[in-house]
Image (cartoon, rainbow, N blue to C red):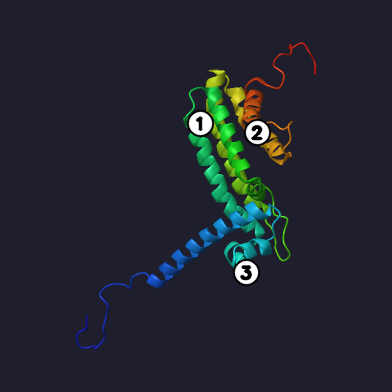
Amino acid sequence: MNTSGTGLDVPSTSPGPDGRSSRWQSHREERRRELIKQARRAVHTLGSDASMEEIAAAAGTSKSVFYRYFGDKSGLQQAVGEVVLSQMQRRILEAAQSALTPREGLLAMVSAYLQMAATSPNVYTFVTRSAAGDTGDTPSSGAVSGALGHFFDAVADMIATPMRSHLGDGKEAVIGYWPKAAIGLVRNAGEQWLSTPDSPAKPGQEAMALQITAWLCVGIAPELSPAVRI
């Protein structure tokens, strides 16, 4: 409006948000999501040791673009890891919800974990280890470890629920230690299985899931008497 006697146009309301800034932010977020998808495909094909330069070339862009969006290789690992591990976590939770008994719940979660990891061992390895560091990078493994730690903490909480039912009441002291120990067993056995070359001696995915679940529920040698020392 025009203020009487001043000749000044004084706006009656404050300016709205800059539409160009919002569009640019949306563009950056979409571009970042696309780069994560392309990086995931590149690692799946090239291997977990793929360099930033190799990943960028496979994505049809330059390494500087990935640096601009992710900072360094650890930043890219974290970004890809957040997507991959979130998908794994949802799949494991869905598997557990479909089970009828506590032991079936554990088996379903172990099976889902192995299945997701085996879908692309290269991508799984890429997001579950610290960056080796390309030339010019300053890797920060803390970010990668943080995302991974959150994932395994969430899975530990999930597997504690069926184990409480499996053991019954009055076993909370045992449950307090068991989930983290169980996660260590599942992860280490699973990753060793993933890295083992295919051969007649290597168990299939279903057999491996059954074996890990048996270790979780009854131990390594349930037929041994308590008096026998091993």
Q: What quarter of the picture does the N terminus occupy? A: bottom left
Q: Say which residue label 2 marks.
A: 186
Which labelled disc corresponds to residue 96? 1
Rendered residue at 62%/65% (across/down)? 67
Q: Amino acid at mark 3?
A: Ser
Q: CA distance from mark 2 to mark 3?
A: 38 Å
Quarter of the view holding residue 222:
top right
Regarding mark 2 in the picture, which secondary structure is present there?
helix
Give the left or right position of residue 171, taking residue 3 as reference.
right
Give the residue at the far right of this rendering. 230
Q: Say which residue label 3 marks.
A: 62
Q: Amino acid at mark 2?
A: Val
- Judging depth in this view, the residue of 22 and 30 nearest the camera is 30
Image coordinates of residue 161 in percent, x first then y, are 52, 28
Q: What quarter of the picture does the C terminus occupy? A: top right
Q: CA distance from mark 1 to mark 2?
A: 15 Å
Q: Nearer the viewer, mark 2 or mark 3?
A: 3
Tag 1 and tag 2, C-beta contact below 8 Å: no
Regarding mark 1 in the picture, which secondary structure is present there?
helix
| Of callouts 1 and 3, the N-terminal one | 3
Tell me the crowding category of disc 2: few under 14, some 14 to 19, or many 20 or more residues within 10 angstroms, Cα based.
many
Give the left or right position of residue 204, taking residue 32 as reference.
right
57 vs 162: above or below: below
Residue 18 visible within the image: no
Regarding mark 3 in the picture, which secondary structure is present there?
loop
